[in-house]
């Protein structure tokens, strides 16, 4: 009968090998403890004790954890918070990977500056915790230990220089004051006594504290320059004068400027309305002091112009420049209406104009227009 000793992860075992002329009664009990095995000799055979029955005591030992591998826990990798653009970054924690040990954390990421996280290491059944744990680890049971991580809280305060505030001190007494405060990571307030307090925004500070007060300015009291007294104006003959009319000219020396002479002009326009539309025309008087428009468009003077089928033509006259003025009361607008009644016979032949023709009836008026 053979008893196998235990290992780290398995209890001992019992077995029967090389048995001759005898048989095992029942089976061997493999549970941990001391047991009795009974053997029966075959007919015609006896055991050494002269009996055909033999009882053997054996012990099955429990697994021996002292034979398990001792494994040290490994510290987690910690990335502390740093300052970027005046703000703390997010700290990081990465657990180690160790055979025989499982790691857990008391809180899940993301983490914050100043936060404390507890890492727990738990050994499995085939690995042992060392008698002396590495620095930072605290034993909590035969197969567990903890490691505490506290994330640093960096000071991300940015030191800035206080602004230079311009001083405004115009001539005259008691008017010195500060100008506009330059923009920056701060706020400002003007106090009742004329001083200015500038306070750095959160995350910023001045070299000597969070706020700076600029004392009220002392006026230089520089007097304003007195404009020189203008000389007494005189007339061309050198005598003093007065300006009772307040027109910048002396009463005795006022120069009479004659008014600008304008050329008075008078406009004129005429029309002929023939049957159909081919002979419908109108004309405006030719005069260098007048310009005309027909239905809003500038037209040529002194020529018969076709209506191009328009039923109404509105002619307007106006002075060609500031040197001319239309005669008061004279006509300046002519509204010509043209019929579209078809011709019953061939219309009269008009005077040759290069485009359309006019009847003899209006020929006289035409000659007056272009004269």
Image (spheres, rainbow, N blue to C red):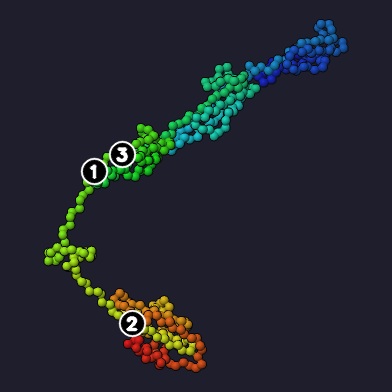
Lower position in the chain sequence, tag 1 or tag 3? 3
Q: Position of residue 163 (x, y in %)?
A: 34, 40
Residue under the point 18% across and 54% down: 228
Looking at the figure, which quarter contains the C terminus?
bottom left
Residue under the point 82% across and 8% down: 47
Q: Position of residue 225 (x, y in %)?
A: 21, 49
Element carrying mark 3: loop
Count how many numbered circles sit on residues in the image. 3
Is residue 159 something that shows in the picture?
Answer: no
Where 215 falls versus 330 (above or below)? above
Name of the residue lying farthest toward the right = 43
Answer with the quarter of the image where residue 194 lies: top left
Q: Position of residue 333 (x, y in %)?
A: 39, 80
10 Å crowding of disc 1: few (<14), some (14-19), many (20+): some
Q: Which residue is mark 1?
A: 221
Residue under the point 87% across and 12% down: 43
What is the C-alpha distance between the residues marked 1 and 3? 15 Å
Lower position in the chain sequence, tag 1 or tag 2? 1
Where 240 falls versus 103 (above or below)? below
Q: Position of residue 116 (x, y in %)?
A: 53, 28
Q: Nearer the viewer, residue 263 or 121?
A: 263
Looking at the figure, which quarter contains the N terminus?
top right
Q: Nearer the viewer, residue 11 or 205?
A: 205
Element carrying mark 1: loop
Q: Is residue 190 left or right of residue 34?
A: left
Name of the residue lying farthest toward the front = 244
Answer with the quarter of the image where residue 110 lies: top right
10 Å crowding of disc 2: few (<14), some (14-19), many (20+): some
Q: Which residue is mark 3?
A: 216
Q: Which residue is mark 2?
A: 266
Where 1 falls versus 145 (above or below)? above
Q: Nearer the viewer, mark 1 or mark 2?
A: 1
């Amino acid at each position: 009968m053979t008893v196998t000793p235990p290992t780290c992860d398995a209890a001992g075992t019992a077995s029967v090998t090389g048995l001759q002329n005898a048989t095992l009664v029942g089976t061997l009990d493999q549970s941990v403890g001391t047991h009795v095995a009974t053997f029966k000799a075959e007919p015609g055979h006896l055991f050494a004790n002269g009996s055909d029955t033999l009882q053997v005591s054996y012990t099955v030992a429990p697994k021996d954890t002292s034979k398990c591998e001792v494994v040290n826990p490994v510290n987690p990798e910690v990335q502390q918070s740093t300052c970027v653009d005046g703000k703390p970054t997010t700290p990081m924690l990465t657990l180690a990977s160790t055979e025989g040990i499982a790691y857990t954390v008391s809180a899940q990421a993301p983490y914050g500056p100043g936060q404390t996280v507890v890492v727990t290491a738990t050994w499995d059944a085939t690995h042992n915790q060392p008698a002396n744990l590495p620095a930072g680890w605290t034993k909590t049971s035969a197969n567990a230990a903890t490691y505490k991580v506290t994330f640093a809280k960096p000071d991300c305060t940015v030191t800035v220089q206080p602004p230079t505030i311009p001083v405004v001190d115009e001539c005259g007494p008691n008017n010195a004051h500060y100008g506009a405060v330059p923009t920056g990571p701060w706020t400002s307030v003007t106090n009742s006594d004329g001083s200015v307090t500038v306070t750095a925004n959160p995350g910023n500070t001045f070299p000597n504290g969070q706020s700076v007060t600029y004392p009220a300015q002392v006026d230089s009291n520089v007097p304003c320059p007195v404009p020189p007294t203008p000389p007494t104006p005189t007339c061309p003959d050198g005598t003093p004068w007065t300006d009772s009319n307040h027109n910048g000219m002396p009463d005795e020396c006022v120069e009479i400027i004659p008014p600008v002479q304008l050329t008075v002009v008078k406009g004129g326009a005429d029309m002929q309305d023939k049957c159909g539309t081919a002979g419908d025309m109108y004309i405006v008087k030719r005069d260098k002091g007048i310009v005309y428009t027909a239905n809003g468009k500038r037209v040529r003077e002194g020529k018969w112009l076709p209506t191009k089928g328009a039923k109404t033509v509105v002619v307007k006259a106006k002075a060609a420049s500031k040197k001319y003025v239309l005669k008061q009361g004279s006509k300046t607008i002519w509204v010509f209406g043209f019929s579209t009644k078809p011709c019953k016979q061939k219309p009269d032949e008009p005077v040759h104009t290069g485009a359309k023709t006019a009847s003899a009836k209006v020929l006289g008026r035409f000659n007056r227009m272009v004269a």
